[in-house]
Image: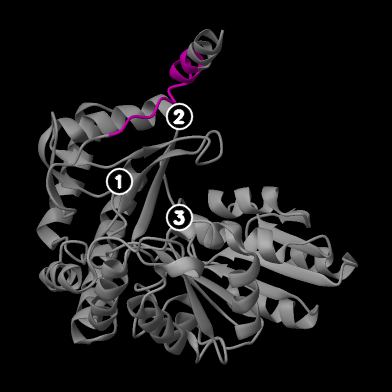
Amino acid sequence: MLIEHINRQLREIDAAALRRKRRIGQTPCEPRQQWAGQGLMLTFCSNDYLGLASHPRLALALSDGARRWGAGSGASHLVSGHSQAHADLEARLGHWLAPHVPDAQALLFCSGYMANIALMTTLGDREATLFSDQLNHASLIDGTRLARASVQLFSHGDIAALSHQLAACRTPVKLIVTDAVFSMDGDVADLPSLLALAEEHDAWLVVDDAHGFGVLGERGRGSLEHFGLSSERLIYMGTLGKAAGVSGAFVAAHPTIIQWLVQRARSYIYTTAMPPVLAYTLNEALDLIEGPEGMQRRAHLQTMIGQLREGLRELVAQHDGLRLMNSFTPIQPLILGDNERALAMESALEARGIRVPAIRPPTVPAGTARLRFTLSASHTQVDVDNLLQHMHDIWIKEPA
């Protein structure tokens, strides 16, 4: 019965053009990557925004770190898995965020998903209300579902609606929860207005900066640096497997909040610590992010973003039924609407040696299937020109 039950649901997924599949990468994460059964392709699909995932300095640090720390941590942080490499990285991340979260301490997690589950379930107790943007990442959505707190959604970016909800709330603890850069739309939350609401209504602002850390801000310290924000009411989550090029995540917040997470966050307490070699390597990644090379890579990335947007705007102007989202980040979604249409464009590009993923529900709302272009500082102007030329050719010869 179980297999029959699952197969029936899989057929329904197929009928809606929603079946997902994995692809096997056979070379490192770079703009040109070898894929099993597909050969070498020009890719616009990774979150390696600064092009650090295969950077020689990180590969060397990983090798050096393995000789010093071995392969694994051996246990959870609270048993015996918390190494000096972890402690050093946490201290540095806390220092990075301290101008924006006064007296900040940092706590490492194995992934952003685990960090967000920890924040929502640990802070969202029965005396709290969580106010969550409707387009928040799945990890925040799942965290709010697991929390014991009351949960109120607010329409995406609707500051006025959120203000009314906060004013009517009577729980002693209130937390506003938002992505900084929304992963499927690429737009940036109005963090200054959200923080002002938090201060007005005695609330806290939880910021998931998975797609902003390393990319936004003069030194790559993320959305808080980008907006010049500073407040004890900020609780910040950043990931280390996107722009930082390695793996893991961290929370930076008031020391009391960090201590509470250590005592109560089940996704921190009951899992093996990330290998110390990764923490060791991430210190090298932070050197790159905040140094001259990181600044050069962010500047080049902005040039690539401008070039891609200009070309996509021309495409939208020439063809009906297309919509380019308003984004100044490396995430550039082109809305096609129909699931089959998005898959057809994905396949047409793949036939020309270019990989751009079709994103469909439930990842995005029904009727907003899209191609999600993501740029890296390792892309070149020639790469983007190549992509745009093929996009125009496909639409002329094979209109979707």
Q: Which residue is at a point 21% across and 65% down the rendered structure image?
A: 51
Q: Position of residue 293 (x, y in %)?
A: 18, 81
Q: Position of residue 307 (x, y in %)?
A: 24, 62
Q: Earlier in the sequence, mark 3 or mark 1?
A: 3
Q: Quadrant of residue 266?
A: bottom right
In the image: residue 74, left or right of residue 337: left
Q: Position of residue 180 (x, y in %)?
A: 52, 67
Give the position of the N terminus as an image quadrant. top right
Q: Which mark is residue 163?
A: none
In the image: residue 394, left or right of residue 5: left
Write down the residue under mark 3: 183
Q: CA distance from mark 1 to mark 2?
A: 18 Å
User: Label 3 neighbourhood size at 10 Å, few (<14), some (14-19), many (20+)?
Assistant: many
Query: Quick check: can you spot residue 209?
Result: no
Q: Which mark is residue 338?
A: 2
Name the residue type under label 3.
Answer: Ser
Q: Earlier in the sequence, mark 1 or mark 2?
A: 1
| Vertical placement of residue 239 versus 353, above or below | below
Name the residue type under label 2.
Answer: Asp
Write down the residue under mark 1: 315
Q: Which residue is at a point 70% across and 75% down the rendered structure image?
A: 204
Query: Quick check: can you spot residue 121?
Result: yes
Name the residue type under label 1.
Answer: Leu
Q: What segment is highlighted magenta in the picture?
A: 10-22
Q: Which residue is at a point 28% across and 48% down the rendered structure image?
A: 45
